[in-house]
Image (cartoon, rainbow, N blue to C red):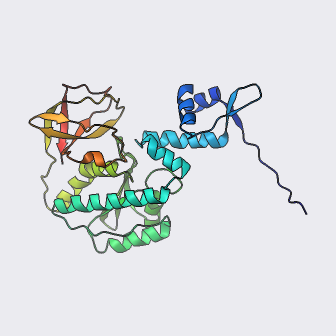
Amino acid sequence: MAENRTEIKQREYLIGDMSEIVGVSRDTLRFYEKKGIIKARKKENGYRYYLEEDLFRLMVILYKRKMNDSLEEIEGYIKGENSVEYMKKHLQTRIKQDAARIRELGMKPFLLQRGGDDTEKLAEEIRKQLTECDALITSGGVSVGVRDCMPYVAEALGADVLFHGINVKPGSPMLAMIVEGKPVFCLSGNPFAAAATFEVLVRPVLERMRGKAQWKPEILLGILKSPFPKASPCRRLVRGKIEDGKVWLPEGRHSSGMLSSMAGCNCLVDIPAGSSGLKAGEQVKVMLM
């Protein structure tokens, strides 16, 4: 007997419709087509059109671009290329990065195994670990995707959520909560985003927990030697190196997923919200790391 299947027809969007819905130019859509991230189809009259699946994919792209993911990272995510190896590599990088920094600050890290996406299991593991440590830091799972489960874990724990989301880039999805009287910091899964928010928001808490009630980060002023032309609608933290009052930025991309360009950096350049870009020769405020 032949199987009776009903194919659900997806809604079609012309390129102009798609451009208006997502708020990007037609040239941007064509660029994503050339990169193979979205696929345009053509009607008999030659008009380009997209399906609903393309719209959803494009929304993911734009969200990840907002989170400062590089185009290469987004391509791999969308196409599913080496996704498991990619995640393993990032996980190992984050673990080593966080543990080394905590040791450097004179504290003792306890390295935990990677958790899955099971909300109840993660909640139980957090409860267990908080009996052994004074504070807990997690990385990843704090955005708004299907697999970003930490907000649900907070609910399962009955946690007192202090905030979820900050007006700072990178690392804007950060979540902080109190569980059984102890702080839990849930940082972005991107290595530099996690490093930056650790320095700005987590380290001050840990220092005070160590009894350094008057501790404050060391802030310096310097002259920027390399430009940063990107506009910053919200506060932005950029890796840099300050020496003799001069501030250099690493060459290449400033993606929050790239940790390699942190090599040789000793500060975070603190760019205020509303900046239209920085020119070489401008005075900037930096936070020493």
Is residue 59 among what the camera can see?
yes
Q: Quadrant of residue 3?
A: bottom right
- Towards the viewer: 48 or 12: 48
**Number of marks in the rendered image:** 0
Q: Quadrant of residue 97?
A: bottom left
Residue at left 33%, top 48%? 193
Q: Quadrant of residue 221?
A: top left
Q: Is residue 117 left or right of residue 197?
A: right
Is residue 148 among what the camera can see?
no
- Towards the viewer: 171 or 85: 85
Residue at left 18%, top 45%? 266
Q: Is residue 92 left or right of residue 72?
A: left
Which x, y percent locates residue 120?
48, 69
Q: Compared with residue 23, is residue 214 higher up or lower down, i.e. above or below? A: below
Residue at left 22%, top 54%? 203
- Location of the N terminus by quadrant is bottom right
Residue sitting at the far left? 244
- Towards the viewer: 130 or 48: 48
Which x, y percent locates residue 90?
38, 56
- Towards the viewer: 68 or 120: 68
